[in-house]
Image: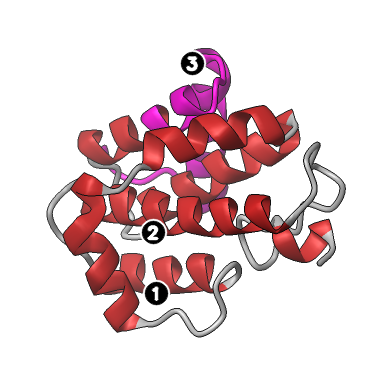
């Protein structure tokens, strides 16, 4: 398995050569983390819009082919008990800065998929960056850039 297929936070944004640690374990941890990140962000405001659902399925599907509605419902129902923080700490040590930023950008895109930024969703994205070991200022800049790219939604 090559890194360009193992590390992709978004189907249109491959991250080749951004992995310091090769192997299937990394790919499995990354796929699980993306599922858990998406569930955390989508579920943060206790509502899932059609736009969030569509982007969630697309984002996770880039890592887990065949990921569908039932998988998303399952992930949402167990997101509070998922070991996301531990996964992100592991990935923070394995991914380069570009790989870490790709995960935060993917989470930020899911956050703004419905055209608004709920403070709870923003906190969830910030928590992802923090668990990856990123500086708060860098995470905030990535979130703001994603918001600007998508057209600034209401906060």
Q: Secondary structure at mark 1?
A: helix
Q: Residue at coordinates 42% horizontally, 43% vertically from top-left?
A: 152
Q: Position of residue 140 (x, y in %)?
A: 48, 24
Q: Residue 149 versus residue 109: which sits nearer the camera? A: 109
Residue 54 numbered tag:
1
In the picture provided, is 14 more to the left or to the right than 71? right
Rounded to the nearest whole Å, what is the CA distance between mark 1 and mark 3? 28 Å
Which numbered disc flags the more N-terminal residue, 1 or 2?
1
Q: CA distance from mark 2 to mark 3?
A: 22 Å
Spatial CA span between label 1 and label 2: 9 Å
CB-based contact (under 8 Å), mark 1 and mark 2: yes
Q: Residue at x 60, y 30 (%)?
A: 92
Q: Secondary structure of the magenta portion, mostly? A: helix
Query: Which range of residues does the magenta coloring cover?
Result: 127-155
Q: Closest to the observer: 56 or 145?
A: 56
The residue singled out by tag 3 in the image is 136
Nearer the viewer's eye, disc 1 or disc 2?
1
């Amino acid at each position: 398995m090559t890194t360009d297929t193992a590390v992709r936070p978004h189907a249109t944004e491959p991250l080749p050569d951004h992995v310091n640690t090769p192997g299937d374990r990394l790919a499995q941890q990354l796929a699980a983390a993306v599922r858990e990140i998406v569930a955390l962000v989508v579920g943060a405001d206790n509502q899932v819009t059609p736009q969030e659902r569509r982007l969630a399925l697309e984002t996770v599907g880039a890592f887990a082919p065949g990921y569908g509605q039932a998988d998303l419902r399952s992930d949402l129902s167990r997101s509070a008990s998922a070991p996301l923080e531990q996964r992100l700490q592991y990935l923070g040590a394995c991914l380069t800065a570009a790989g870490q930023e790709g995960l935060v950008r993917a989470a930020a895109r899911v956050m703004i998929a419905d055209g608004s930024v709920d403070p709870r969703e923003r906190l969830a994205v910030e928590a992802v960056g923090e668990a990856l070991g990123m500086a708060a200022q860098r995470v905030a800049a990535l979130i703001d850039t994603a918001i600007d790219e998508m057209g600034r939604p209401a906060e």
